[in-house]
Image (cartoon, rainbow, N blue to C red):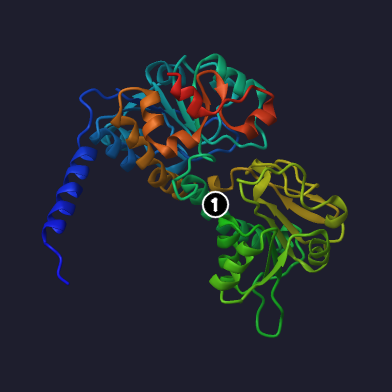
């Protein structure tokens, strides 16, 4: 039986018209002045947008203001940003007073909260493990529209910014563990990959997410024995298939965790940021079972500790020893490779920032963009994420309900 070619023509015509409708921008769009401040959080060396990223934003009609020396630790100079089309602000006060959208890496520090202007949009990380009532109260009182890296989500459920940061953190976790196993750093003196005739180190990874994936990949690449544990069996099945059973998997229960603690030279806490960490998964009693000179890397520290013995450290003072175990609990691990991390963050952020130019108002932007709407955690004076409401005791409202009332 034959089919009329008219169907093909109809399909083409509809497709062309649909594409044309999406390509035509509204006559009036929101005028964006995007501010990139210098990071003030301890040991935060990244910058939210690289000079090539700024050039793309400027070419799309976004005015960019960057604070003096914001890219210093990434070896991005003021000249690099000026040549890309950015305006250099001599102070944070100057930047915050002129921008209507602030994009930064770390959550706003106390001294930065006072600089935020009423009605601004803020895009940054949130760090659920350290979020404060003071920060949320300020955002509410100043009618800030706040979007968090941890919440920006695509329609397929992917967290693109979290994934980018997690890839770097997973690789760095293994590099860091290898260093602190060395005798000179107080470690047990074990080479992570071993050599012929000498067994390699045993690495246990808690969490079969993106951090766990890249940590496992790097650890296996160096020759370590790797065990991955997670509460979800399907995630473990995917790991076994991906690595062709070159690693061991186990369900994350008290029995397996305590048994693995006794034999592990390294344990990496890599729980997903989607999981609410109400209490540490690894108790202090289990940490005591670990061998002297072994290493804990708690990548989950910014969302809530994975180990009962974890406490925040920094790049300046990254480790401490408890029960004979070296603990590394730096919340902004990717900052150790600031230039790579800033390029990666820019690549992931740009598509979302460019969406800001498509509509006339912030409510229009959030209505039309699934990702930005999902990323919003404060809007119109309310917390729009249940987990943040529970952590800070501020009233929760569904963002869709708030947008409907605009």
Q: Position of residue 174 (x, y in %)?
A: 62, 61
- Pick out the residue farthest to the front: 1
- Which residue: 52% across, 53% down? 168
- Which residue: 65% across, 63% down? 178
- Which residue: 47% across, 31% down? 123
Quadrant in the picture for residue 404: top left
* Depth check, front residue: 132 or 190: 132
Does residue 71 appear anywhere in the picture? no
Is the C terminus in the top left, top right, bottom left or bottom right quadrant? top left
Does residue 92 appear anywhere in the picture? yes
Side (left or right) of 238 relative to 70: right
Quadrant in the picture for residue 200: bottom right
Q: Where is residue 294 in the image (x, y as percent from the top left)?
A: 77, 61
Side (left or right) of 137 relative to 251: left
- Which residue: 70% across, 42% down? 304
Look at the picture and state if 301 lies above or below 242: above
Look at the picture and state if 88 lies above or below 272: above
Q: Where is residue 338 in the image (x, y as percent from the top left)?
A: 49, 46
Is the N terminus in the top left, top right, bottom left or bottom right quadrant? bottom left
Q: Position of residue 42 (x, y in %)?
A: 60, 34
What is the secondary structure assignment of the residue under circle 1? helix
* Depth check, front residue: 248 or 175: 248
Q: How many marks?
A: 1
Q: Residues within 10 Å of mark 1 (few under 14, many from 20)?
A: many
Q: Which residue in the structure is indicated by mark 1?
A: 166
- Pick out the residue farthest to the bottom: 197
* Depth check, front residue: 404 or 374: 404
* Depth check, front residue: 22 or 192: 22
């Amino acid at each position: 039986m034959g089919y009329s070619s008219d169907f093909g023509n109809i399909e083409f015509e509809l497709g062309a018209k649909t594409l044309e409708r999406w390509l035509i921008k509204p006559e009036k769009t929101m005028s964006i002045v995007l501010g990139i401040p210098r990071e003030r959080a301890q040991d935060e060396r990244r910058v939210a947008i690289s000079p090539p990223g700024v050039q793309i934003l400027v070419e799309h009609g976004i005015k960019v203001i960057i604070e003096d020396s914001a890219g210093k630790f990434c070896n991005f100079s003021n000249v690099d940003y000026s040549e890309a089309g950015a305006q250099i602000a001599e102070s944070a006060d100057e930047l915050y007073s002129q921008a209507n959208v602030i994009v930064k890496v770390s959550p706003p520090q106390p001294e930065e909260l006072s600089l935020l202007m009423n009605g601004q949009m803020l895009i940054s990380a949130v760090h659920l493990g350290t979020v404060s009532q003071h920060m949320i109260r300020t955002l509410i009182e100043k009618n800030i529209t706040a979007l968090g890296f941890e919440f920006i989500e695509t329609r397929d459920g992917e967290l693109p910014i979290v994934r980018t940061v997690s890839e770097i953190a997973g690789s760095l976790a293994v590099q860091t563990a290898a260093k602190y196993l060395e005798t000179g750093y107080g470690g047990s003196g074990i080479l992570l990959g071993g050599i012929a005739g000498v067994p390699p180190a045993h690495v246990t990874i808690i969490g079969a997410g993106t951090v766990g994936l890249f940590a496992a990949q790097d650890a296996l690449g160096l020759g370590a024995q790797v065990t991955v544990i997670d509460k979800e069996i399907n995630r473990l099945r995917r790991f076994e298939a991906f690595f062709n059973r070159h690693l061991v998997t186990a369900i994350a229960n008290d029995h397996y965790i305590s048994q693995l603690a006794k034999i592990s030279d390294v344990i990496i806490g890599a729980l997903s940021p989607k999981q609410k960490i109400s209490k540490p998964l690894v108790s202090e009693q289990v940490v005591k079972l670990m061998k002297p000179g072994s290493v804990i890397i708690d990548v989950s520290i910014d969302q809530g500790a994975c180990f009962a013995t974890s406490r925040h450290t920094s790049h300046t003072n990254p480790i401490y020893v408890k029960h004979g175990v070296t603990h590394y609990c730096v919340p902004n691990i990717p900052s150790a490779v600031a230039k790579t991390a800033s390029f990666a963050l820019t690549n992931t952020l740009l598509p979302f920032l460019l969406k800001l130019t498509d509509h006339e108002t912030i409510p229009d932007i959030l209505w039309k963009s699934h990702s930005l709407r999902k990323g919003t955690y404060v809007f119109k004076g309310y917390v729009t994420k249940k987990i943040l409401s529970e952590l800070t005791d501020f009233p929760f409202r569904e963002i869709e309900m708030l947008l409907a009332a605009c």
